[in-house]
Amino acid sequence: MKQAKMIDKNVRASRADGRDAEVGRRVRSRRLECRLSQTELADRIGVTFQQVQKYEKGVNRIGAGRLQRISEALEVPISFFFGGGAGGTNSVRETGAAGGNESVFGFLQTSGSVRIVKAFHRIKSRKARQLLVEMAEELATEAS
């Protein structure tokens, strides 16, 4: 009986959980920020695109060595994938994002940016989304 409980604990410990899903969301976000497809990231880290899908959805855990390869491919430190806590910050200086671009997690620190993202997500038309992105990029260029 005691051995069965130990095995059950070990099985539960190896399953992906909410922390793995958050790491996966951060992988996806940074991959998109780098304008890489799942296939391109997969090629860089030596897995299939299906495996990248599973990582991004939090279905599969990412091992330490694989996470190191992902961080190198996406040009961020491993701490980028962990919020708060030891070394897990989201500022430009801390993430080391390529070209000095701030991580999208840094952008989502205001209520206005969160409202925009939520509204954008509710737009069903792909064309309307694309037009909105182009308009926002144009407005941002004019403001610079």
Image: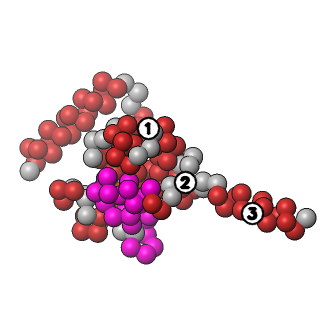
Q: For this rendering, which residue is in front, 138 or 58?
A: 58
Q: Earlier in the sequence, mark 2 or mark 1?
A: 1
Q: What's the residue type where badge 3 is placed?
A: Lys
> Which residue is drawn at the image coordinates 48% and 62% (left, top)?
64
Q: Amino acid at mark 2?
A: Arg
Q: Which residue does the image show at 26% across and 33% down from the upper left?
A: 132
Of the numbered discs in the image, which one, if any, rests on residue 49?
Answer: 1
Question: Which quarter of the figure has residue 77?
Answer: bottom left
Q: Residue furthest right?
A: 1
Which residue corresponds to mark 3?
A: 9
Amino acid residing under circle 1: Phe
Q: Which mark is residue 61?
A: 2
How much space separates mark 1 and mark 3, taking CA atoms? 30 Å
> Of 7 and 143, which appears nearest the observer?
7
**Left or right placement of residue 4 versus residue 86 in this view:** right
Q: Earlier in the sequence, mark 1 or mark 3?
A: 3
Number of residues whose C-alpha sits closer than 10 Å to that of mark 2, classed few (under 14), some (14–19) or many (20 or more): many
